[in-house]
Image (cartoon, helix red, strand yellow):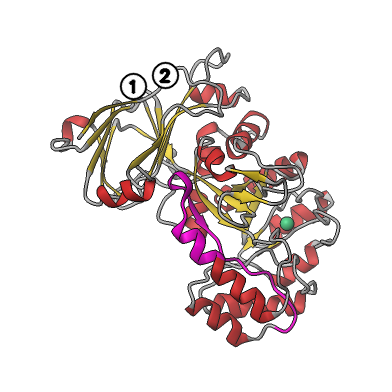
Amino acid sequence: MSHEAAAQKTAQDKLVIRNIGLLLSGDLAQPIFDRDTVVAVGDRIVAVGKETNLDISGATVTVDAKGTALAPGLIDSHVHPVCGDWTPRQNQLGWIDSYLHGGVTTMISAGEVHTPGRPKDVVGLKAMAIFAQRTFQAFRPGGVKILAGAPVLEHGMVESDFAELAAAGVRILGEVGLGSVKDGKTAHEMVGWARKYGIQSTIHTGGPSIPGSSLIDKDMVLETDADVIGHVNGGHTALPDDQITALCEKSKRALEIVHNGNERAALLTLRTAAELKQLDRVILGTDSPAGSGAQPLGIIRMIALLASVGGVSAESAICMATGNTAKIRNLSGGLIAAGREASFVFMDKAQHSGGKDLLDSIKKGDLPGIGMVITDGVVSIQRSRNTPPATRVPEVVKSR
Ligand SMILES: [Zn+2]
């Protein structure tokens, strides 16, 4: 059965997840909850607690977590989708489904800029954005949600274009700087129009990604004042260190760290945000597919990097790919709490990791093993085909 059909069939079905060994809430203020059971109805969590205190009767599907860790489905804050589950950049099919096997249940487009022949005139770019928003809303490989339809700014756009895009359902801009608008003054004005109509903005930061794109330095980032400082660690080429620390200190906007960036600059950003006591600004993305490929495990690799050599706890690093992103991006997932989206990733220590448990293994730099992913209350995958094998995996013990 397709995920769509399953989601329809189970609109009011009850999902019980029991025997959770470690509940990773996604909330940076309290990343670990002492709870062992989660109940969802349809696509929403309705209760989180101790099994003895919850009504787990009448479950349509019961998952025995077998003592594994449960976290919110991971969010990739920076992807470049194009057309369904194909990327022309590396001519690869099925990349979104592969990311699902890396625990990602939500992706946010930073622009469908790899579209061959991408239109740069205003009518054409609006049409493409609306087309992408519609197609990705309707097409969810394995249940992964892709928030797409992210136009990049081109000269000639006027306020009414943003009103029209918003009315048509467009909620995000692609990276400022990837289109023809490359000066802070124009970008600031357009980002302001976008914000006025409820469209969130992000900006390319650092050197050019590929031939044809260009440098965006700290002055342009500060002047533009987009909602998200996209790949603050460069995508790939980072700004000089003093510019990165200036962005952390002088802006209050989200600090997006990506896999396809400079890893040393990622750690500098993390350390600076920690010193400022602003780790809630840090969100994670892959910035893929891109020149360096598609990385199905990119988000868990970022979590392992930041936790193993960046000085944050593994449970906090996981919040940077879940609750932090959900808060900044106004998403319904990202937290394990009543009312939130019932999308989860089950993890355990990878087999033969030297860590004593999941969090210790991540702290030692190992990737977690993923044993199951649930999107919107529906079991999407069981043991991941892409991560190292988890030591323990959850099991569906009752399914009507
Ligand atoms: Zn970029």
* Mark 1 close to ligand 1, CB under 8 Å: no
Horizontal side of 319 relative to 41 (left or right) equals right
Nearer-N-terminus badge (2/1): 1
Who's the residue at 65% across and 65% down the image?
174
Question: Element under label 2?
Answer: loop
Residue 289 location (% of width, % of height)? 67, 48
Q: Is residue 383 visible?
A: yes
**Circle 2: is it few (<14), some (14-19), or many (20+) Cα within 10 Å?**
many
The image's mark for residue 313 is none
In the image, residue 191 sits, relative to residue 85, either above or below, namely below
* Mark 2 close to ligand 1, CB under 8 Å: no
Q: Which residue is mark 1?
A: 66
Question: Element under label 1?
Answer: loop
Q: Quadrant of ligand 1?
A: bottom right
Q: Amino acid at mark 2?
A: Arg
Residue numbers of the magenta segment: 132-156
Quarter of the image with the N terminus in it: top left
The image's mark for residue 392 is 2
Q: Amino acid at mark 1?
A: Lys
Horizontal side of 142 relative to 268 (left or right) equals left
- Do the residues bearing badges 2 and 1 touch, measured as CB atoms within 8 Å? yes
